[in-house]
Image: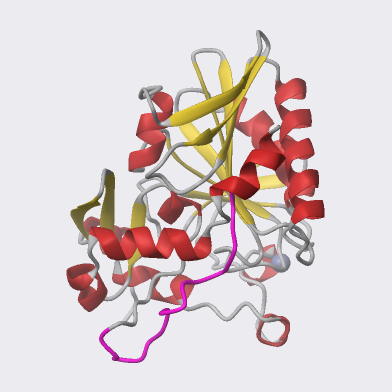
Amino acid sequence: MMVKGVDCLTNSEVREVAFDGLRCKLQFNPGRVVSATAKVDAKSIAARPCFLCEKNRPAEQRGVDAGDGYVFLCNPMPIFNPHFTVPTLDHRPQLIADCLPKMLELAERLSGEYTVFYNGPKCGASAPDHLHLQASPLGAPPFEEQLIADTPGFVDWSDKRDSMTVGITAEPEPPAIVIVGEERSTVLARAMDAIAKLASQFPTDPEPMLNALALHVDGQLRVVLFPRASHRPSNFGHDPAPQNVLVSPGLVDMLGLLITPRREDFEKITGEAVANIYREVSLEREGLIVVSD
Ligand SMILES: [Zn+2]
């Protein structure tokens, strides 16, 4: 039987969970099981054809030119409607430094409509071998909605200047660096600087573990970096043991919309369990203060 991705999304269920001021949503979406359980070690990656390379894509999958060697594709197993995957035409590894300039450029072009995001090779990308961004409807996940609305207390602004503002998301949100400014080149330079500091403070190969987003509203670019401590929570697993969950956090999960491909996880995960997942997979807030200076 052919599984149709949009049908999976249409039939998905959403449930709200809360804990200690943290308000999140769970999306039960069985179509995402392949992505959530993707083996991303070098050997498994080398053994499969790359699904983002044009020669291996399904014949029905058409693309729209995104400029600079990138192409918009419809994600075959969407979390949002619409949900785009934006890979490069050439097959090269997922690296934030290579695609951050394009991410900001696309965010400006898609101003007020879409958020452009990135999952690191060890932080939710199911194709770590092929450079790609994604785009989703602006403000869809819970924390993104608060970010756009400038909800008081959502971000602790440590560095306020005329041209740019830098801060860290406040408790109880998972710790993230937020950079806001009007000038793309200034925001890009500040974000690259934060990534370089992360790389020296918390060295991991081939880059600091992170998820990132860029969006543009009311003339301002916003970049959010979620530095990560681990790929998946320690209780990640298929095993039917009651504590195990099949949640593989990427950017969308870090923004308060957790994708659960299994019904049992959708039904059992509590707000407290989500807070524990965030604690395990995020870098500690104290570590980010150094980076955001
Ligand atoms: Zn490829």
Which percent across, then down, holds residue 277?
41, 64
For the residue pair 200 and 12, the one nearer the viewer reads as 200
> Which quarter of the rendering shows the N terminus?
bottom left
For the residue pair 229 and 27, the one nearer the viewer reads as 229
Q: How does the figure colour the protein chain or chains?
A: secondary structure
The furthest residue to the top: 162
Q: Where does the magenta region start and end?
A: 226-242
Q: Is residue 28 visible?
A: no
How many numbered marks does the figure carry?
Answer: 0
For the residue pair 289 and 49, the one nearer the viewer reads as 289
Name which quarter of the figure residue 89 lies in.
bottom right
- Magenta span contains residue 232: yes
Q: In the picture provided, is 99 more to the left or to the right than 123?
A: right
Residue that appears at 70% across and 41% down: 290
Residue that appears at 74% across and 58% down: 202
Name which quarter of the figure residue 244 lies in.
bottom left
Ligand 1 position by quadrant: bottom right
For the residue pair 32 and 60, the one nearer the viewer reads as 32
**Depicted 254 relative to depicted 126: above or below:** above
Q: In the picture provided, is 63 more to the left or to the right than 26?
A: right
Q: In the picture provided, is 233 more to the left or to the right than 17?
A: right
Which percent across, then down, holds residue 45?
68, 80
Q: In the picture provided, is 291 more to the left or to the right than 75?
A: right
- Magenta span contains residue 267: no
Q: Is residue 156 visible?
A: yes
Which percent across, then down, holds residue 264?
21, 78
